[in-house]
Amino acid sequence: MEGKEKRELWDVYTKERIKTGRYHVRGEKMPKGDYHLAVHVCIMNSKNEMLIQRRQPFKYGWPNMWDLTVGGSAVAGDTSSQAAERELFEELGLKIDLSNKVPSFTITFPEGFDDFYIVKQEVEVSELVLQKEEVQAVKWAGKEEILRMQEEGTFVPYWFLDKLFDLDTWYDTYRNENSKIRVGYAKAKNINSWMSLAEVVRDEFPGLETEEKMLEYRDTVIKNIERGTAVYAVFGNMVVGVLLFSRKSNTLSCVAVHPEFRRRRIASRMFARMLVEMDKSRPIAVETFRAEDPRGDAPRAFYEKMGFAEGELSLSKEGYPLQKFYFHTL
């Protein structure tokens, strides 16, 4: 009985991550169709360094290699966050409450699910109590050092290792910030992403109703890119804002922002970039929808906010009723 009591049991899950009520004994081969839960915790400090551990040379699975802060399998009865808390305490003597934290991401593997927690916390290495059966050393290390260790073959080769240092920043930027949304001049490599955005907003612009017109627009964008009159906003490599203008005619041809990235001053930033290139002695002209057209509410409000004044009524090439607006810099 004593040997059985020391056996580590895992909850068995279905592929939908539902507990079956059955248990699996660690070390035995897991039957096909059964899955278990694993967890990893990555502790990051204010310098964006990660607390990493070196596994013992006699430890099964990546012996003597440097690894993430902690990791292991959930035992029977554990929730994901409880397993993460337990691993932190068992391996490092560190107590952190993760009861209100969800995994930053999950990776599936042939026998189960691996939840990864990214935790921002300052930790004094000298105060940690290492589990000698598992961990031989710990230290703080930055992204460059860890990637160098991985390159030289002394760090467990996680394929996503470089992404861990930017994941929280990416989420924060997407939800709240503008700092990672860059504004500049588009290049040829951006054309497909530009056109992907055009597909999203095409209903907001007259003249883009057909595939033929979209192809014509693509050619127009390419010509503007070559002339240096295509301003874009990018989130990573994704084009989230576009603006075309003409130095020759001193006109703003079109401006659009991805629906999921609006109210972040992207259009204003692209407009400011365009202004640098325009002839200040002439008014800048733009055509948009007329006041009675519901599609004109947002663009008209934007142009008025930027300082444009209403001008004469006009028609598009296809005969769609529009109105001109003028911006006077002097």
Image: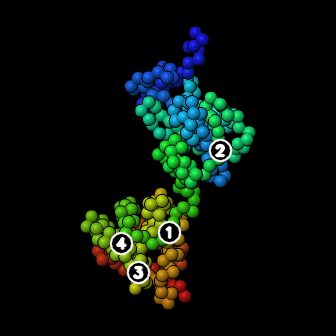
Asked if the residues shown at circle 4 and circle 1 are in contact, with their CB atoms under 8 angstroms apart, the answer is: no
In the picture shown, does residue 13 fall above or below 200? above
Local packing at callout 3 (Cα closer than 10 Å; few below 14, some 14-19, many 20+) is some
Tell me, yes or no, whether the two marked residues, 2 and 3, touch with CB atoms within 8 Å. Answer: no
Q: Label 1 amino acid?
A: Val
Residue behind mark 1: 183
Q: Position of residue 14 (x, y in %)?
A: 43, 27
Secondary element at image label 1: strand
Of mark 4 and mark 3, the one earlier in the sequence is: 4
**C-alpha distance separating marks 2 and 1:** 38 Å
Mark sitting earlier along the chain (2/1): 2
Tell me what residue is drawn at x 47 percent, y 39 percent.
107
Which is in the foreground here, disc 2 or disc 1? 2
Spatial CA distance of label 2 from label 3 is 56 Å
- Front residue of 209 and 131: 131
Q: Mark 2 or mark 3, which has the lower sequence index?
A: 2
Q: Observer-nearest residue: 28 or 279?
A: 28
Tag 4: amino acid? Val
Front-lying residue, 57 or 13: 57
Along the polypeptide, which appears first: circle 3 or circle 1? Answer: 1
Q: Which residue corresponds to mark 2? A: 139
Looking at the rendered structure, the number of numbered marks drawn on it comes to: 4
